[in-house]
Amino acid sequence: MKKITKLSLVAFAAMNVFTACSSDKSAGVTEEADGRFDSLNANTLLAWSASAKQYRVAVSGAEQSGSAGVWRYFEEAGEGGIAEISWPVSLGSTEETLLNPVIDHCQGICGEFRLKTDSSGEEPRVGIGFSIEGLNFSSQDEVQTKLCVEYSSSAALKIVIDFGDDDEFALKLRASEEMRERCSVYSRMNGSVAESIYFVFESDKDSEGSFNISKINWVKEVLQ
């Protein structure tokens, strides 16, 4: 899969099908009484919940004053093609607050996308995501991780973990008109340094649809 182009504002610097998560949807996260995340537990890599009024993803090891965890979006199409996301409300005025109004309005990040191929056949694509700069897996132990996402979408999509140097790991999310949570286990993490995570819609034919991403949680455990 062609890597996402790193755009200035709206972008960010083996295939498995998700399985149903356990009933414990807050594992690894400490919450305050008002529902806001207070801190990440030792084994939580990142966590975000729109219902907890979080505007950025909490990323383990990252400076929360930096760019890590800030939601952004991208639109990519060849000449003559179309790749666009329509938002339900006006976007924020700065890079850090770009999708905040959407999160408030949707209790998640929701929108409608439209993809139209060009004469070259290049696949158009759109997506949302965030940097996870500062997150690494330098432990000498073999680490297994579980990535869980709560979402709804009228079309199938991919969640891509970008490790840089043309190395990506893509997880497939099936279409679901109802909000649901899906998880996948990934073990090849020892010594890896991840750069970003993004949700991608792409197609080799004209398509359109809607989506809402409301929660993401990534935890790790040392294999015995």
Image (cartoon, rainbow, N blue to C red):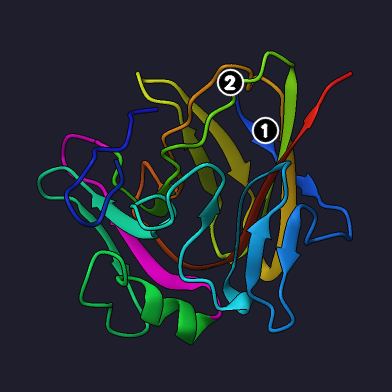
Query: For mark 1, does the 10 Å Cα neighbourhood hold few (<14), some (14 to 19), or many (20 or more) residues?
Result: some
| Closest to the observer, 146 or 62 | 62
- Span colored in magenta: 107-122
Tell me residue 98's x, y (percent).
Answer: 30, 70
Residue 150 shows in the view: no
**Splitting the image into 4 quarters, where does residue 196 fall?**
top left
Which quarter of the figure is the N terminus placed in? top left
Res. 138 mark: 2
| Closest to the observer, 185 or 88 | 185
| Closest to the observer, 176 or 193 | 193
Residue at 59 percent across and 25 percent down: it is 137
Tell me residue 23's x, y (percent).
Answer: 89, 60
- In the displayed image of the protein, which residue is found farthest to the left? 79
Residue at 25 percent across and 64 percent down: it is 95
Query: For mark 2, does the 10 Å Cα neighbourhood hold few (<14), some (14 to 19), or many (20 or more) residues?
Result: few
Tell me residue 81's x, y (percent).
Answer: 18, 50
Magenta span has 31?
A: no
| Closest to the observer, 74 or 140 | 140
In the image, residue 15 above or below residue 188: below
**Splitting the image into 4 quarters, where does residue 90 fall?**
bottom left
Disc 2 marks which amino acid? Answer: Ser
- The reply, left or right, for residue 138 in relation to residue 117 is right
Which quarter of the figure is the C terminus placed in? top right
Disc 1 marks which amino acid? Answer: Asn
Which residue has dot 1 on it?
16
Magenta span has 116?
A: yes
Residue at 16 percent across and 42 percent down: it is 78
